[in-house]
Amino acid sequence: MATPFKYVGRSYPAPDDSEKVSGKLVYGSDLRLPGMLYARLVLSPHAHATVGSIDTKKALSVPGVVGVYSYHNAPSTPYCRYRIVPGQAGCIDDETLFASTARFVGDRVAAVVAWSLEAASEAARLIEVIYTELPPVLSADAALEPRAALVHSSGNLVHEFDHATGDPAALPAGAVMTCTAVRTQMLHHAAIEPHTCLANFDASGKLTIWSPCQSVYGARTVVADLLGLPYNRVRVVKVPMGGSFGGKQEFILEPVTAYLAMQTGRPVSLTLDREECIRATMVRPEQRSVVRSAVRADGGLLDLDIETLLAAGAYASSSPDYAEAMAHKLTRLYRVRRYRHRGRVAYTTAPVAGGMRGWGAPDIATCAEIHMDQIARQLGMDPLDFRLRNLVHPDDIDPVTGRSVGEARVRQCLERGAEAFGWRDRAAMPPGLGRIRKAVGLACGAHKNGLLSDTFPESNTMTLKMNEDGSLDLNASIHEVGAGSVVTLRTIIAEELDVAPEMISAREADSETSPYDFGCFGSRMTYVCGASARALAAKLRDRLIEAAAELLEVSLGILEAANGRVQRIGVAGTGLSYPQIVQGSRMRHARDMIVTHTYKGTSNPGSYSVQFAEVEVDVLTGLTRVTQVLTAVDIGRAINRGMVEGQCRGAIQAGIGSALCEEVVIDSAGRAGTGGFKNYHLVNAADMPPVTVLLVEHDGDDGPYGAKSVGEIATVPTAAAIVNAVNRALGTAMTTLPLTPERIVATLCETAEIGGRDASCF
Amino acid sequence: MLLSTVVNGTEVSLDIAPDARLIDVLRNALALTGTKEGCAEGECGACTVVIDGAAVNACLVLAAQVQGKSVLTVEGLSSAGQPNALQKKFVELGAIQCGFCTPGMLMSATALLARSRQPSHEEIRRALAGNLCRCTGYAAIIEAVAAAADEEGSQT
């Protein structure tokens, strides 16, 4: 295919891939410093309990133990692990370094620091904590009952909202009403590298934190505010990370590790084990949404009314924002006359809920897309036709935000995907009557591009320097999560300056030396930071042309930048090479080829994905196999094509898990994560179906070369597409995820479940 | 106890605790941190090493169990600083994202290719079933192993 691009749109390995295949890349959990101490945490075994006396005598007598810390000897200043910018709205300071009231199984009660991990572990086991148990509150429903125990004295209702927009006029005659209650479950991010952090407080009074995090400046904000240090005395360095998926977005280990380093005056390393990661970091929240709709008999959506109840777990962290995010997805996806979304967020004595890939979008898409299939079934319409009737068009205004959805190509995704998948023929096939029932399902999803909203701005600052040999250094707060951010930015700069990408080196974020950036989340990396990099490179290109004109003593207008030089327009080989310009300009005109640019984001269009899945369900065992997935993504422009496809496939692996097998289950005592990965099943290579990726590319949005986000949107519709396929295969209306074999068999046995309806509907 | 073993082709003699796990001896005593720990219970495969030709989870093996045996870790795959066919294909075909599962994947694939020169895609999927990846969806990894088998097959 002819492309106007020299570098954009090809496939690139990550720059550190050769270190990754040789085992040489030093990840956070591989870091060692001279004189380093090891920390182990003591976590509450109770879901809800007052922490009384803590007997540390035996622990302190273990050889090599340096100290034991708990609320008895550490400050109890409350903080919010989710805060990025100082004074950030919506952040609730309800967590402390060590709990005086344990609010979930896994709450931090104490920490031991020792010269060896073995000594720290042994001592942690020997700490005797006297707990006075309190009544647990294990679901959001239970939390909001009148006599529920209070998780925090402020009350169990953390946040509520009621957003309504559009025309509340009476429904026309013949309108069809549908109601669906859908529950999505707590999920573990399951980054293969466990959570880890290393901190050192040096003799000069500077705290350095090496963390595989998604925001060095956010970690700095939280830690410096908590420990009372000036922002320039807290240096946070982003180190190589073995996956995050949002699980390392919030600052879970940084505060406690930093505190321990300050207390001991030595480097302190803290790494969690898998059970601790599942139970004591954060989970995708459990939420239940009741979706009510009214549609015209011809399938036109009139009203969509949603009530969401979300369990925040023991600390609010990002849950209020997460629930709000859920209310900002569906009006980017469907044209509706009236949209109302009420949400409540409740504290529970369960694992702390927080952001995870898609940040509310998969959660609400799962609810809405199961519902849309139910509407279509009620109308006797093909789910494809029903969606085509209602999906947004390019340049529609999202009635909730008042912003344009941009060059929204979700309809094209649906049409192209349906054709490539063969939807019409396959959807018409009966699922069969035998033990194995086969069917296809589809779902659509919408997400965003960056943080821009009525309450949050969007910007990014970067510096680019060209050296005397023409090589370039990009200085930006990049947080590589494994999704190829470094390569994406290099490719964009290479395209803009017409130099080979290998000429550009880019460091990851270091709050001491790299310019400010909010962090790598919110689907902002390519759309916002990529656009910033493009503008930055264009600025340097202009600077090179100016400098060349000055050196050549010609007018600017006759020069262009191409092939690594500034030449007369259209005349290759004339003019000066970039190295000649850098060197000449410095020596003759005291000009330096370094530029800094602050990019301001002014748009936040929709990102879209439509997915088609085929499943085979064994009605005897309830086991579901996903046999094929096709995803059509409105990517705008693929910068690193191979990585875009890889992101899509990985997102679908996680989405299949959330549909069928992944769940952080808590028992009646509030214990979660017992047994680690033994009891938390990820889709493995043997069970992963073939995935076809279709990319819909176009210009029109503000991202670099039209590029939009992919890593999050790619997982948004997966679970719904699979659930819809299973329901079509079985003639059921299951709405409680995951569709485990047990749940499927139970549903088939009690054929009573109809439409996920319950007393709360109508 | 004194452990005598061969690691990545080099004889090693070490004083170890009898209950030391192989993964800890590799990562701490020998500074071979390419072997990763993801779960400590043999579920994720990030710590896979090859012991006398077999892919084994180093978190489930005592170091004492490799007495007199030969252990290959990810650091032993390249020779003279040059990546082998598997390593090259992993890079070329985009089989790597965060890279934390990569060493374990490479070692499971190494054991597979040692026993099956031209494995089918199905055999590759089964051989990697004990190695979890959260980033890639596995497709590129499976392609990389198949391509490495092809390349090694064509060279011999």
Image: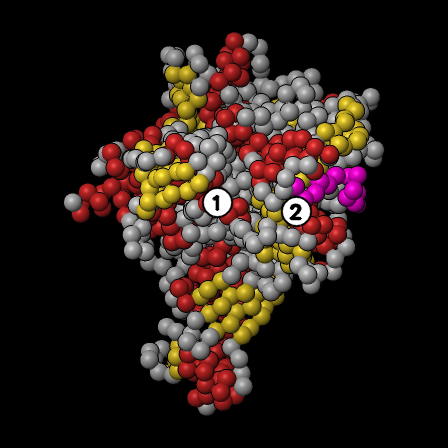
Q: Position of residue A314 (x, y in %)?
A: 72, 33
- Horizontally, residue A175 falls left or right of residue A70, namely left
- Kind of residue at disc 1: Asn
Location of mark 2 (residue) = A257
Q: Which residues are magenta?
A: A65-77
- Horizontally, residue A109 falls left or right of residue B77, namely right
Q: Are marks 2 and 1 on the same chain?
A: no
Q: Position of residue A517 (x, y in %)?
A: 62, 58
Q: Nearer the viewer, residue A508 or A758?
A: A508
Residue A63 drawn in magenta: no
Residue A69 drawn in magenta: yes
Residue A589 in the image: above or below residue A276 = below
Q: Which mark is residue B28?
A: 1
Tag 1: Cα neighbours inside 10 Å, few (<14), some, or many (≥20)? few
Query: Does residue A535 appear in the picture of this structure?
Result: no
Residue A406 in the image: above or below residue B43 = below
| Quadrant of the frame with the C terminus of chain B | top left
What is the secondary structure assignment of the residue under circle 2? Answer: helix
Residue A566 in the image: above or below residue A596 = below
What is the secondary structure assignment of the residue under circle 1? Answer: helix
| Quadrant of the frame with the N terminus of chain B | top left
- Residue in the image at 32% along x and 33% along y: B54
- Horizontally, residue A46 falls left or right of residue A626, namely right
